[in-house]
Every structure is written in structure tokens, then in C-alpha cells.
Amino acid sequence: MAWRPLRDATHIEVVESEASARSVLVEHFNDPFEVMVADDTDTELRQAAHAYVEALCAQSFIADELQLPPHWREAMDPASGAHPLFGWLPFDDPATHQSASGPRGSLRSTPAWDQVAVLFACDRFGKDNYLGSGFGLALATRLRQDGNKRKASFLGVSAALPYGVWKSVPSGPRLAVLNSMFDVDSLFRNPASLATIARAATLDDVAIRGVRFAASPDQWWIERRGIGLRRIDGLEVPHAVTMLTSGGTALPTTESITHVAALVADAVGDTQVFDADPSSATGQLVRPTRNDLATRRTPEPILPGVPQGPLEYRHPPGAAKPLVQVLCCPRFVKADGKVQNPPLVRKVSLNAGAPAVISDDASAIQAFRHTRELVRRLQAYGWSPANYFRLTAPEIRIFYRSGISPGPGKDGRTVNARVIPDGWPADAIRWNNPGPAINIHLAGGDLRVRNRARWAAGGPASPAIPMGIGIDKRWMWHEFGHVLLVASTGELEFRFAHSPGDAMAAIASDPDSLLQDARRGLTFPFVFIPRLHNRCAAHGWSWSGTMHQALAAVPDASHPRRKGYASEQILSSSLFRLYRCIGGDAVHRAPPGSLDDRRRASHYTLYLIMQAMQLMGDARIQATSTPAKFVHWLRQAQRHSGLWNITWKKENYTRVGGTLGKVIRWAFEAQGLYGAGNGPGSPENVDIYIQSSRPTIDAGMGDATDFGPGSYVPVPLHWQAAGAAPPRWQADPRAGIKYPTANGRVEVRVGNRGPAMANNVQVRLWVAAWPANANPPDWSPGTWAPCTAVGAAGPNTIPGKTQPLGQAFTFDLPPNPPTAPGRYILLAEASCDEDRPHTDTSLLLSCSTQPTPLVDLVANDNNLGLLVVTIPSA
């Protein structure tokens, strides 16, 4: 039977202008495209991907929006042979990340709990020379064993299509002319050509990272995008540069620099360190000027087993290169000696105990400690650094006291930090090398706070030493957002926001933080800057509203776009809401287990952000240019095929894949995505729900927006204690699941948030015993007793925007023993053609086939409802 996705179950986003690639996203999470493959070889996966692309193009409502160039479709067919201008990227080696040529290739996910392959296709010049033009597509597939074969499941495609002159595809004689004029060496590596670009842009050592070319009958165009260095205030600062070369049969050849922009992103021996920023640790706003900061530190091994040595982290311990190094900064720290090239590794001595809070040693130690934690988290989450750092070397080098150039902070007297790749290789397009290391330059944490050693009579004056910004864990997490982005996509910033760093800082710091109410929304409460992660969409902090509007209108030609922090706060508000929805709103330290709930939610949200960035792939193939595309990759990231299982600081955290697809979308919808103007966005065309007892207003973070019934307003995700009221994530006992009714039956009511008609609505109900002093049972298909529908199954259509009481479906409980006196859990499932629950096995989600905690399943899917009931003795 031919695959025909429902229009109302398909989301299509098209963003285009005369100055930007045509960005297209197609996704259909409720209508998977499935095809059988013999194995997971390149050939089998490409054949499956081609079948999927052709199935998409067979749907007129999709093809009209997708508008794939004909030669793309031809090139993606493995049976048609190699096409000279477009093709699939080969899978790279998971250990070395080297492929035959071109940008980093198609990838297979590394973590053991994930079985996903992402296939990329893009422009090329000849058979093996991939151009990194920025025009291409990406699609993910998940594989599951089905007998002696595997079933590949596809849920969407993200594409960036040519625009303007780049639509002019050279063919026939024009292609032959270009082939005779240019080869890969002349496009990417010709020394004279690189020197011409460098001189014209006043740069040094230019490396070409991407090429576009096009030709009409009379003219041709070649655009080269690269990176060159310019020395500013003693630092080699990378700059993005674009040169356009054009000519034709009757036209002279011309060359012009069209864009130059700085490529930077701001923002055991035991000792005493700040595990968390002092504000989070105390619940009060503590500033760096406090004179009691030393009492707020905790002991931690920095140099295991030795009292002094270099600040570097190698894993395994005997590895040839360190993953993290703190380097000397002699231009800013007199004690670091003379300038060395390469810089020396910073050493510290802990013989005298913990260094003073405001000291060079403390600045170096804190920056090292926080960066080592990032690398250890990557390892705990299932990656080796070599697996994750696909586009750079797995080396993070920290300049713990540095200047910030370009800009006014070249002397280091600024509250700031900056991430800079350490020079892209000259052969950047082929990637036959590990790519650059990543440098983090750290300036001050507070300009008012300096420490000076006591002056000795007759001696020289002691230097005034500032507090280094590396002391603040949250600031370091902001910089880590840039580190992970450039490592996985080759770009320091998102196209649609500054970075995920603010969100990661807030989510990593919140579980143990004692900040409450409005203070909980301060992203940087210690080294203070006024950025928040509880912004209200109705006040302009909306993906479709005032604060994002200017950035959304900037053309790709101006890349890298210089972004302020408005869109970053929209992103951090979206992602922090996601964290709160999946457990982050547990009441802090009460009831028992709440802190574990918050930590579990924090770890999993950070993992999803990291995994989504890796799945996005090299931005030179097709960039994740809109927040909706990022949501797509987040939803792909949470669909892992096995049990997500990590250990962090001797604590174990697990989740079953596939439970969060709907709540991820809602977290961004509540921030204005999929809408227009200031305010929340629109739900999917069909979004049926069983009403829970959640509030419709998110008062916990000061947002007065009424999201209406069926939404996912964050609430604590705990179970009821004996005699306590039911938690608010469970069903509303009057408007969701009612028991008993007047005749002793169970009534389930279903509404519809979306504007379109819900067709063929079906409801099922199960019951399971929950004995006293026992943990709640997991959802496990086939182990719960089904209830019997009474009479007709109820109306099979529900109009859009149904009122809270919705449509009623009635059931009888099964006979004894399931309904003997005792405590029971009723689990209701509403489903329709356009909106299926996560328990639907046809969606191929792990949570539909494996035992899954009910709180993870029900709280994050409004198609499900749960009610705890007690049947008394007769």
C-alpha cells in the first residue's frame, strides 16, 4: 500500500527570500515512512533514503513546497550512477571522522542507546569533490530489527535549496567550460588564488571552506567562502571572508570581496572550588564583591594524587594529547614568565592549601575544573570526545587571563569571554586532518574586585589581580555552548540565535540551586548580566514576535550574523521550559526523590541539546537556520532506540526513548514558534487530549499567558503520598477521567486543541493494581488488563478547539480479580489518524514496546490520562 501522509499530520515550514537559501522543513512524526533494508550499509541506506524522498515528492502538497531541483532527485537515486553536481555524502569513519572527501560525511550516532543514521546530500564538483556550498539536505532514519532484515523509519527532511543566480545549474557546454577552467585545486588550494583573496580582504593564511558555482548560457559565477586570520591586539583573530568571481563568453572575469566578519563568539591534590555559583548555592544574590566568598567553596581533587602539576586532563590518562589544557598568559600575568610559542601549560601548587579566591591560581583552577566537567559529561552521556568533535580536534585550550579582541576589552579589563577556533587547516574542505583546537579566552569576572599582595618596603609594587570569569560555572557553560556548536557544525553560533549556552548554563545549574521564584529565572546571578530564561512571549520574547524579528530577517549572505542576546533568551526560555516540563519543577529537596528528579531532567535535557547539535551536522551541507529545524533535531534526538542510561557522580539516571516528542514541540510553541506576533504559537492542526489537572497559566515563572487545557504547563512530577491530593499531571477527575459515574462505570473525555477536525478518534482504557507499599507499575504492553467499551465507541470525529469537557467515552472495568477491593491505576489512551499517542506501536518508539515509567509517558503526552482509584470493600 502506498504511503500517504495526512496533510493535517504533516508540518511544513518554508522560509525564503531573494538573499537567502530556501529553507524547507518537512516533518510527519505521526506518519512514519517505513522501508525494509537488508543491512545498514551505505548502499542500503541510500536506497531507502531515495525511496523516502520520492515518496515525499509523490505527495503534491509536499512537493509543491519542497521544490527539490530535478538533478538532486536524479542524483539521489543509487541506480542512476554518480552525478557530477550533486550526491550523497559517504558515511565517515566513527573513529577518525574521515570520509573519502568533502565536509564531514553522513553519520551514525555514537551512544549505545541510540541507533540513528543521518544521511546528507550536497553539491559537488565531479565525483568525489564535495563543495560545502550550503545547499543540500539532511534526513535521519532509525533502524529496528524485523526478522532477518531491518526496518528503516523516516520522519522528515531538512533542506537548504539554491536561490538567486545559484539556481542556474551548469550543464552541457557550460559545464564542460567550467571543468576546463577549474579543478578542485584551483577552487580550494591554489596558492596564488588564496593569496589574492587574502590581499583583497587584508587577511593572512586564508583557507577555503566552501564553494558555490552556477552558470547561465552567457555567464558563470563562483563564490568561495573561507576563513583567514587578522592580527588584532596581539591575537590572531579568525575572520569569515567571501569572494565572488564571475565571467562569461563576452564578459571579463571579475573578482570582489563581498563579506568579511570576525569569526568569534563572546560571551589528587585537593583544593577549594566553587562547585556552583555562590548565588545558586545560597539562594541569595551573592556578588563577587562579597568578602566571605572563600567560605562558600567546597573541597575537590584537581590534581589527583599529587600536590602540584600542570592543569590538563587526558583520557585515558596516558593519551598522547590532552582534552583540556590551561595555558600560561604572560601578556596578562607577570608570574607566567615570557611569551612562548606554543604557550606553556599552566602549573599550580596546592602545597599551601586552597589559593585565595581572587588569585591567578584560583582563576586557572576554576576554569580547568568547569571545562573538565564538560568533557566528563560528554563521556558520561555516551560519547568519547573524538566521537563528538567531528569538525574540530578534541582539544580545548583555556587562556585563563586574556584580552578580548576585537573589541574594547583587549587589555582584559572587561567582564567577558570568547571562543575562537585555533586556525582552520589550509585543506579545510577535505578534512584529512583533525581540524583546529578550540581556544577559550577568559577575561575578568568583576571590574571592581582586585587583589594586591601586601607591599614590602623598598620592593616593587605588586600587580593588581582581578577575579577571573572562569570562577563562574554558568559563564563557562555559556562558552561551552559555542564549543559544542563549532565542534559539531563548524559554526560558533546558531543561525537563529546566539548559542544554546544560556540555556545550558541555566539547566546545568538549576537542579541544586536554591534560587526560587523570580530569582530562579536569572541566568547569571553571580557574575551578573541581565539575561533571563523565563521570558514571556506576550512581552515580545517570541519566536514570531518583536525581539526575534530583526534577526530572522538577516540574509544568509551576512553570515556569520552578529547576534545580540534577545534570541538567545528566547531559546533559553524555550529549553528551560522543556527541562521544567520533564521533571525540573520537582519541589526542591521535598518530597523525597525530588532532587533526583531535577537532576535527571537536567541531564536528559542537556543530552538532548548536545545530541541535536551533533545530528545537525556540518553547516556547509545545510544549516539549521530556523528554530523549527532545531526542534526537529531535538525530537529526533529523543527517539533513541534503547534505554538511555548514564552514571554521574555515582548516581544512575535512566529514561526510555520516545516519550518527549510532543512536549518538546510545546515548549517552543509556548514561546511563539508556529505562530505570528507576540504570544504563544499555534498547536498542530489536530492535537487531541485527555485533560489533566494542570493549571493553564505558568505562574511558577511569572508568565500570565493562559495556554488553555491540554497544554503541558510545568508541574512537579511526583506520585501522591497516602492521603494526599492527586498530583496535577494526572487526569482531571471531572473533565478528564471520571470514576465512578452514577452507574459505576468509567468515563473518559477527549478534547482537541488544534483547529482542524480530528477523525476516527478511538479511546482505550486499561487498569492495573497498585498495592500499598509498592512502587507504581510501569507501562508494559500486554500486562495491563483492558477495559470494555460500553455501547458505541463514541463519536469518531472531534471538532477543532473543543471545549474542555470534549467528547465522552464510557467503559466497564473488567471482572474480578482486577477490580477486587484495593488501589488501582486507570490508564486512558486517545488516538486518531492525525494524532497518535506515544503508546502506539506503529510509531516505532521504544516507550511503546518497552517497560516505561508511567510518569514519563503520561506527563509528556496529552493523548494519555491517568487516574488513581480505590475500590472499597463491599
Image (cartoon, rainbow, N blue to C red):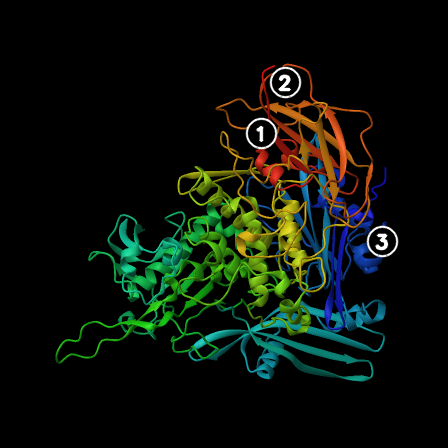
Question: Taking 742 as reference, is 514 left or right?
Answer: left
Residue at 51% in and 47% down: 584
Residue 818's tag is 2
Task: State the CA–CA distance, disc 3 to disc 1.
Answer: 40 Å
Q: Which residue is mark 3?
A: 61
Task: State the CA–CA distance, disc 2 to disc 1.
Answer: 16 Å
SS of the residue at dot 3?
A: helix
SS of the residue at dot 2?
A: loop
Q: Of tags 3 and 2, which is closer to the observer? A: 2
Residue at 30% in and 62% down: 362
Who comes first in sequence, dot 3 or dot 1? Answer: 3
Task: State the CA–CA distance, disc 3 to disc 2.
Answer: 49 Å
Residue 778's tag is 1
**Which is nearer the eye, 93 or 551?**
551
**Residue 476 in view (yes/no):** yes
SS of the residue at dot 1?
A: loop
Q: Is residue 25 above or below residue 527?
A: above
Question: Taking 319 as reference, is 656 left or right?
Answer: right
Q: Is residue 33 above or below residue 81?
A: above
**Which is nearer the eye, 374 or 546?**
546
Place of residue 78 in the rendered image (x, y in percent of width and height, measured from the top left): 78, 49
| Rendered image quadrant of residue 171 | bottom right
Place of residue 420 in the rendered image (x, y in percent of width and height, measured from the top left): 49, 68
Q: Is residue 811 above or below residue 361?
A: above
Place of residue 326 in the rendered image (x, y in percent of width and height, measured from the top left): 37, 62
**Which is nearer the eye, 3 or 200?**
3
